[in-house]
Amino acid sequence: MTDFNPVKPNNELPFLPPDTSKTETVRILRQENKTIAAIAELKGIANIIPNQSILINAIVLQEAKDSSEIENIITTKDDLYKAVSSTITKLNPATKEVMFYREALYVGFQKIKQRGFLSINDIIEIQKILIQNDAGIRRTPGTALVNDKTNEVIYTPPQNYEAINMLLKNFVEYLNDEESSLVKMAVLHYQFETIHPFYDGNGRTGHIVNILYLILKGYLDIPILYLSSYIIRNKAQYYELLLSVSKDNNWENWILYILSGIEQTAKETIVKIKKIRKLLDSTIETVKTKASKIYSKELVETLFVNPYCKVKFITTSVNVERKAASRYLHQLEEIGILKSYKVGKENIFINVELIELLKE
Ligand SMILES: Nc1ncnc2c1ncn2[C@@H]1O[C@H](COP(=O)(O)OP(=O)(O)OP(=O)(O)O)[C@@H](O)[C@H]1O
Ligand SMILES: [Mg+2]
């Protein structure tokens, strides 16, 4: 037992890394091997989809939704895919929140691709996009984690601005050093949530940092690991295990939880990707046989990059005039691939089967 006190600011949170006798137990290393195998398979399988934007769009949006739902924001998946094809000012607050998550993830992804590391400022920028304000790192005391049913304080993060900054500096140094392992991701995620550097959005920022870590260390090429769904399904455990590291130095169960989550999520995503590939193939076949005159690889892929498609998307991807693009879409509707509906004066064409698959 440590002398953990839930209402006392955790100003003495230890720097990383923790003692390896706690984080590299036999059980952990055995699970880590299984998880590495699953994520390696996912990385490879992603390449069966010719256009990576298809996966990024489909999977990031699900991750965005689930991660935001941890905050109890409910918005239907239909609304979301629809939202991607409209302007953000028209969206309801919950949908906006999901769109901001998606944007924050993209911005983080671009940054690490360009520079090969993640800085404190990057993390601040990610959180800023998510929460849409300039508050930045906490300066005013008062932030505590509270049990939303009993209102009881369960954890009080460091309250000293200097201490938070030192901890964050240590956090990014450890994140960016040459060592890479999946155990390290679990350790980093605990540390980030426990520092709790922001007034709000620490959970979501932490989930984005997790995905970026996996890309930074070469476990994945694109942001397609969808861990938030696992965390939602096992949320009570997530909270309990975070707390149990702080209280009892119980790293083993926390790390096993995260490693199992990555393994399970990777496997689910592999199944989904294979289904998307199958649907892509059958759609190509249908267009080739029933509308051979308009078939092109670009045309079909556009329907997968944008499950809610507009004429404008076709004019750019296939490089045809508006009139031809519109005719293509109507013809695809006639052969049963798309279903249209009207928003104002504009027609939106839904890739029905893809949306069904993504909603599963
Ligand atoms: N005992 C704990 N110690 C450290 N961090 C915790 C603990 N319990 C929960 N957390 C983290 O705090 C997050 C909530 O913080 P915050 O509200 O700032 O983030 P958020 O993105 O708005 O989160 P959420 O969507 O979960 O409400 C949780 O998602 C979890 O990651
Ligand atoms: Mg919150």
Image: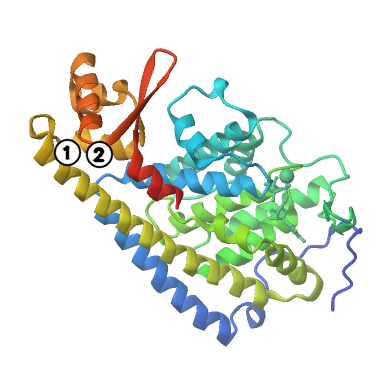
- Percent across and percent down for residue 76 are 54, 40
Query: To which quarter of the image does residue 53 belong?
Result: top left
Q: Any mark on residue 301, and which? A: 2
The residue lying toward the viewer, choosing from 71 and 21, is 71
Side of 99 where 252 appears, left or right: right
- Percent across and percent down for residue 106 are 47, 40
What residue is shown with label 1?
297
Specify few, some or many for label 2: CA neighbours under 10 Å numbering under 14, 14-19, or 20 or more: many
Does 359 sit above or below residue 258? above
The residue lying toward the viewer, choosing from 161 and 333, is 333
Q: In which quarter of the image is ligand 2?
A: top right
Query: To which quarter of the image does residue 249 belong?
Result: bottom right
x 37%, y 54%: residue: 221
Label 2: which secondary element: helix
Q: Any mark on residue 343, and which? A: none
Quarter occupied by the N terminus:
bottom right
- Please name the amino acid that badge 1 sits on: Lys
- Please name the amino acid that badge 2 sits on: Glu
x 69%, y 67%: residue: 237
Specify few, some or many for label 1: CA neighbours under 10 Å numbering under 14, 14-19, or 20 or more: few
Side of 21 where 178 appears, left or right: left
The residue lying toward the viewer, choosing from 164 and 61, is 61
Colour convention: rainbow
Disc 2 and disc 1 in contact, CB within 8 angstroms:
yes
The residue lying toward the viewer, choosing from 281 and 63, is 281
